[in-house]
Amino acid sequence: MNEAKQTLQLPGARERFYRRERQSVPAARAFVRAALTDWGVDGERADDILLCVSELATNALVHGVPPGRGFLLSVIPYGGGIRVEVHDSGDGEPAVPHGARDAEGGRGLFLVETLADKWGVGARDPGKVVWCEVAAQGIPRRLPQ
């Protein structure tokens, strides 16, 4: 599951750092929504991507970002879809909890697993990167420069 990518080297990738605060999740969604609009991605797959962003950002804030720190969100277009990466400095490896479908809480990664075509966790020092990929029509074959 270790498929972390170097976002700064990928044309068209966008990234933004968010502090450990509640308003970071809607700000992250707005940031990704603007990127998707620029890339011509809309409809149901855009909604799926935005929900994945919400869940990954929320998980980073609740479980992965120590006090006084934040997380880096990267959104990367590629020929067949969009990759979302959330980098944080916390330890541990996120996993879909057993019985997540019926639980009142802890369903974030279950939703990501359901909506995304692929997802995983990669190592970074310190911390980890949790990522997902969602196939979406309309992604330009030529990435933005």
Image: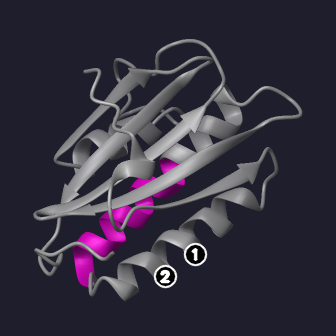
Inspect this view and state whether residue 96 appears: no
- CA–CA distance in space, label 2 to label 1: 6 Å
For this orientation, the residue located farthest to the top is 92
- Crowdedness of circle 2 by 10 Å Cα count: few (<14), some, many (20+)? few
- Amino acid carrying label 2: it is Ala
Q: Do the CB atoms of the residues marked 2 and 1 lie less than 8 Å apart? A: yes
For label 1, the residue is 30
Side of 38 where 58 appears, left or right: right
- Amino acid carrying label 1: it is Ala
Side of 102 where 29 appears, left or right: right
**Image location of residue 139, percent across then percent down:** 18, 75
Inspect this view and state whether residue 35 appears: yes
**Image location of residue 63, percent across then percent down:** 65, 27
Q: How many marks?
A: 2
> From what the image shows, is residue 64 above or below residue 43?
above
Instruction: Determine if the magenta segment contains residue 109.
Output: no
- Crowdedness of circle 1 by 10 Å Cα count: few (<14), some, many (20+)? some
For label 2, the residue is 34
Bounds of the magenta segment: 43-55
Mark 1 residue element:
helix
Identify the image quadrant of residue 37: bottom left
> From what the image shows, is residue 1 above or below residue 115?
above
**Image location of residue 6, percent across then percent down:** 39, 40
